[in-house]
Amino acid sequence: MLNVLLIDDDDDDRFLFNKALQKTKLGIHLIEADCCDAALHLMDRSICPDIIFLDINMPEGNGYECLEQIRAKADWSRVPIIICTTSGNPDDLQKALGAKVEGFLKKPSDVTVLSQNLLQILDSLGSAD
């Protein structure tokens, strides 16, 4: 079973992400955090995911600040992180790739498209085997 952590403040985006993961039909356990603090609390409990999907636009501690804190935790420093955003701004893509993440996902509003994107990401990281 693959442990996936989604850090996203938006209820609707978390719901869509969950539905898209279910649609992949992969053995995935989704762990959700609605803010960076909640994710860091999980870190304190030593729950280490196999991959993290991290929203960059959150009101309490943006995704980049959260990314720095995750990378500072020795047990979590090598967990692949995919930056997720609704932003189409090319500067966000450049900043994400410069932040030493494994990927960038522009959030689609369609569950089927998101499911296909997630399958591609997990396959590229060797997580969909």
Image (spheres, helix red, strand yellow):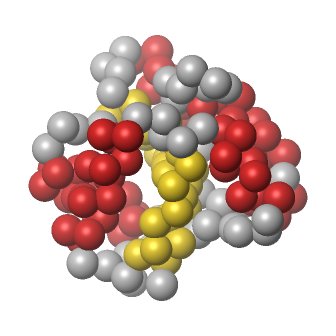
Give the residue drawn at x 37%, y 47%.
14
Give the residue drawn at x 24%, y 60%.
19
The C terminus: image quadrant? bottom left
Give the residue drawn at x 48%, y 35%.
9
Q: Is residue 28 visible?
A: yes
Residue 76, quarter of picture: bottom right
Residue 74, quarter of picture: bottom right
Q: Position of residue 122 (x, y in %)?
A: 39, 65
Residue 28 appears left or right of 110: right
Q: Which is nearer the eye, 94 or 107? A: 107
Query: Residue farthest to the front?
Result: 11
Residue 73 appears left or right of 19: right
Q: Which is nearer the eye, 54 or 128? A: 54
Q: Is residue 83 visible?
A: no
Residue 116, quarter of picture: bottom left
Q: Is residue 69 above or below residue 53?
A: above
Q: Is residue 3 above or below residue 51?
A: below
Q: Which is nearer the eye, 14 or 101? A: 14
Q: Position of residue 24 (x, y in %)?
A: 24, 70
Q: Position of residue 86 (x, y in %)?
A: 33, 27
Give the residue drawn at x 83%, y 58%.
44
Q: Is residue 111 above or below residue 22?
A: above
Count of marks placed on residues: 0
Q: Position of residue 56 (x, y in %)?
A: 52, 29
Residue 55 appears left or right of 111: right
